Image: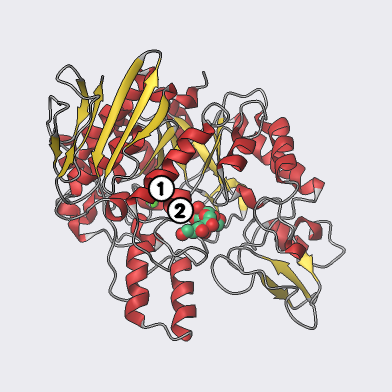
Amino acid sequence: MKWWQNAVIYQIYPRSFQDSNGDGIGDIQGIISRLDYLEELGVDAIWLSPVYQSPNDDNGYDISDYQAIHPEYGTMEDMDELIEEAKKRSIRIVMDLVVNHTSDEHNWFVEAKKGKENPYRDYYVWRDPVDGKEPNDLGSTFGGSAWELDEASGQYYLHLFSKKQPDLNWENEQMRSDIYEMMNYWLDKGIGGFRMDVIDLIGKKPDEEITADGPKLHDYLKELHDNTLKGRDVMTVGETWSATPETAKLYSHPDRNELSMVFQFEHMMLDEQPGKTKWDLKALDLQEWKEVLTKWQVELKDDGWNSLFLNNHDTPRAVSRFGNDTEFREKSAKCLAIVSHMMKGTPYIFQGEEIGMTNRKVKSIDEVDDIESINMYTERLEEGYPEEELLHVINVKGRDNARTPVQWSAEEQAGFTEGTPWLPVQPNYKEINIENALENAESVFYTYQRLIELRKNNPIMVWGDFELLMADHPSLFVYKRSYEGETWLVCANISEEPERLLLNELSLKSKMIISNAKRTTVTSDGLVLSPYEAFVVKL
Ligand code: TEU
Ligand code: CA
């Protein structure tokens, strides 16, 4: 067994986690000061969103120096201290690796712009204009063309994200070898591994308008593995929006020596209109959601490894999106935690999820920080969309939802900072905060703590086969896990109405493992599950 197979990972978005010096920006010393809290929660590793040198065009996902810490987060000494202090608490630090692109302020790009003869020119993707215009129709995720003209040379460079995030050219061997060297620098520090940003894009073939799943993607990952990860006890998780169960097996099959697992997003895209963007909303159909999650559970089986998550720094808060963040906030947050942690794979908790933090509401675009939301707003306003509608979709899907400061206490600024936070603290912090959660034995926090502990002590949670029951039920999510003669049944009512559950498998002899409704016994002759009730029993 690998350590990450029964691990639970906690994602920190450092800007919003804990400020230690009153400048309103979370930092590494802030994280160190909260390690005891994470130890109490019980997590095995932290996925740390980028803390590298960066002009922050995309909040650190635009890196200008991979081997330097942004001064707003601290110093390299702080980083070393974080790794060491975390290790003392058996917590590993998984670094974010952003190597599909750099910042335009990275020295490689500064050199590359000097001209076609520069040795770094080919580290990036340059093309001549076609008919005096962009080489083709490739678009950027953040809006507009993916090509930007460099006046000096008359060539365009590729940027699949912002103009300040030029794409690296993975066909350049020297560039790849520089990346491996940088990765080894971090691995030698004793980190726990890497979360690899949009790694499915590195094999791009821009001339053919192929971005994800390019022909050499897996060759690059194998080479990367052999030059960096091989022989080290680390984990890797690729961020792959394009993954299907078939490609996920290519990335994560234990015999292929590429990655440990990938983040797939199929269950995260069902509330958008097919073929359109994340901003084109559609109501989520629970049956479809169950079907997709089940497909991933069943198809990866022993030929790959799943990651389990319902939110991250790019997506809305899980409780606001899949649960009910008003009347049933705590109950639905626990329900979602149970449903997700009881599956097979490695669970990820995004900061604040463990207390049921909610989405943020804005009334004006001036309150928005996220580049993706702002660009979409500007573009669509020009196309004639009503402002109201645009603010609505930003409130539903915008990335700032996840990025408001962690609510530590009822003190001013939620105990996040003594200054003015870079993004306002949510008004509900007086009620929803970690201090309150720790004092209340019934809080969402203790559901997460219990789920993590259960995973440590019950191999069935890690290895058990998955089987969906009642597939056609519109609001009950019921599944079985079975392992070495043992069977657990997970039952959840993901709706605001009570639901009747009739299952022969249940009996008075079933042993309650966890319940979010203080249920102690179950029977086969009909139970009524209250709104968002969830429980797990051992049969
Ligand atoms: O996200 C990849 C990505 O494609 C996102 O832009 C995604 O489509 C969108 O945010 C969904 O709302 C990764 C990082 O997680 C993200 O924070 C970065 O902005 C992006 O890569 C570029 O590095
Ligand atoms: Ca700070």
Residue 23 can be seen in this image: no
Q: Residue at x 28, y 55 (%)?
A: 320
- The disc at residue 330 is none
Farthest right residue?
A: 117
Q: Which residue is mark 1?
A: 27
Mark-to-mark CA distance, 2 and 1: 7 Å
**Reading the chain from its start, which is encountered first: label 2 or label 1?**
1
Quadrant of res 291: top left
Q: Residue at x 33, y 33 (%)?
A: 479
* Dot 1 beta carbon under 8 Å from ligand 2: yes
Circle 2 SS class:
loop
Image coordinates of residue 237 in percent, x first then y, are: 54, 38
In the picture provided, is 251 more to the left or to the right than 289?
Answer: right
Q: Is residue 60 above or below residue 7?
A: below
Q: Which residue is mark 2?
A: 72
* Dot 2 beta carbon under 8 Å from ligand 2: yes
Is the residue marked by circle 1 packed among few (<14), some (14-19), or many (20+) residues within 10 Å?
A: many
Give the residue type at disc 2.
Glu
Image coordinates of residue 332 in percent, x first then y, are: 22, 45
Is the residue marked by circle 2 packed among few (<14), some (14-19), or many (20+) residues within 10 Å?
A: some
The answer to whether mark 2 and mark 1 are in CB contact below 8 A is yes
Task: Name the foreground residue: 33 vs 276.
Answer: 276
Q: Residue at x 28, y 49 (%)?
A: 474
Instruction: Identify the image quadrant of the C terminus.
Output: top left
Farthest top residue?
A: 485
Give the residue type at disc 1.
Asp
Quadrant of res 516: top left
